[in-house]
Image (tube, helix red, strand yellow):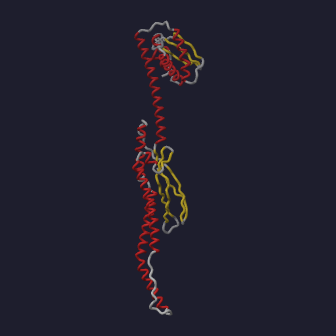
Amino acid sequence: MGAIAIAAILMPHASLAQPAPAAPDASAASTAFLEQRVVQELAADGTVLSRLNVVLQLERVGTALLVSLVDPTTGRAVASTKIDQLPDDRDAAVATVTPVVANLVAQLAGRNPAADEDHARLLRIEKAQREQAARADAAAEAQLQAAHAEQQYEAQAIRFDREIAGVAVTRIPGSTLGVASVGYRWTASRGEVPLEGTAFYEAIGRPDLVRAYHRRGRIGVAALVVSGGLIVGSLVVATRSPTVAPDYSGCQPSDFFCRMSAESAADEQSRDKAKPYIAAATIMILGSGVGVGVGIWYLLRKHPVGEAEARRLGAEYNRKLRADLGLSAARSQARRSIAWAPYVTPTGAGLALGGSF
């Protein structure tokens, strides 16, 4: 309420002779603030206006401020003065007006207290003014704390996104065109900091998933090492296969066909003896291929949880974070992203469009 509206409450007889204001404006709101603060400052110094049977009334007159102490019974000003110019800052304005009102109060030091009923009513009015100012200060402080907590949440909350991991192109039979399929992988960040590797699981407090991440990486490396060992072993086994020398004992030196027959028989025996070695080398090569596939799969998929589970864990962390900061629960908002990925194949090239919505 503005200053005129407050005066109407405090001076019921005087308000009948004055026209009602059209609507509160910014200056009226500023005047009401000054009245409340000045009354508080005076009360803090032990000066209670109700004991003098007066109330404070402030009125803007252009750039000046008319300061009056009004008798609530008659509605007349018993002491008044004028301040030509007020500072723009509200606290500075309170510091300017308070000593002026204190001087006016000093002029009325000899006045008698009002009747008990009026005295009690004025005490209630001043108490209400102090309580209203206290509530406004508490609300402003709570709003400031909430804004600070929201800033902390934005800096620590976990968010998810997707990025293109690869593009595979399938050629349409009988055509030069192809269909591109885009592969994605999920990414997480806390505030503006990306959470790579085990950082996500460390952030949400899941050491078991950190260990699982490292274990999958070790499995991938071990599979590649075993694959390399199998390749080397297959080469060693293949080179160690036994050979049979031709038997020329039954052939004359000039008998060419006999010598060829002996060599063919020796080759056949060598092939028979080499079969187990060739089979072993083949099995090793196949095992090496499996090892390469397993190793690459684990190294590319070190995360022990999928995207859906990761998002659920992130949402739980964010809910707990809001509760710890004293904030109300907020609806999760999906993060929309669009990305382009170039690709080149033996049959052509192009761009793949992908995104999450």
Q: Residue at x 52, y 57 (%)?
A: 352
- Nearest the viewer among 226 and 328 is 226
Q: Is residue 26 visible?
A: yes
As drawn, 301 above or below 109:
below
Q: What residue is drawn where x is 45% and y is 66%?
A: 229
Quick check: 255 above or below 219? below
Instruction: Tell me the quarter of the picture where residue 61 sits.
Output: top right
Nearer the observer, 167 or 14: 167
The spot of residue 175 in percent (x, y) is 51, 67
Please name whichever residue, 9 or 311, is drawn nearer the observer in this view of the structure: 311
Please identify the quarter of the rendering in which residue 277 is found: bottom left
Residue 310 x, y percent position in the rendering:
42, 49
**What residue is drawn where x is 43% and y is 18%?**
127
Q: Can residue 16 be seen in this view?
A: no
In this picture, residue 300 sits left or right of residue 344: left
Q: Where is residue 275 in the image (x, y as percent from the top left)?
A: 41, 77
Q: In this picture, is 117 found above or below 247?
A: above
Which residue is the extreme one toward the front?
A: 249
- Residue 180: give x, y in percent of width and height: 49, 60
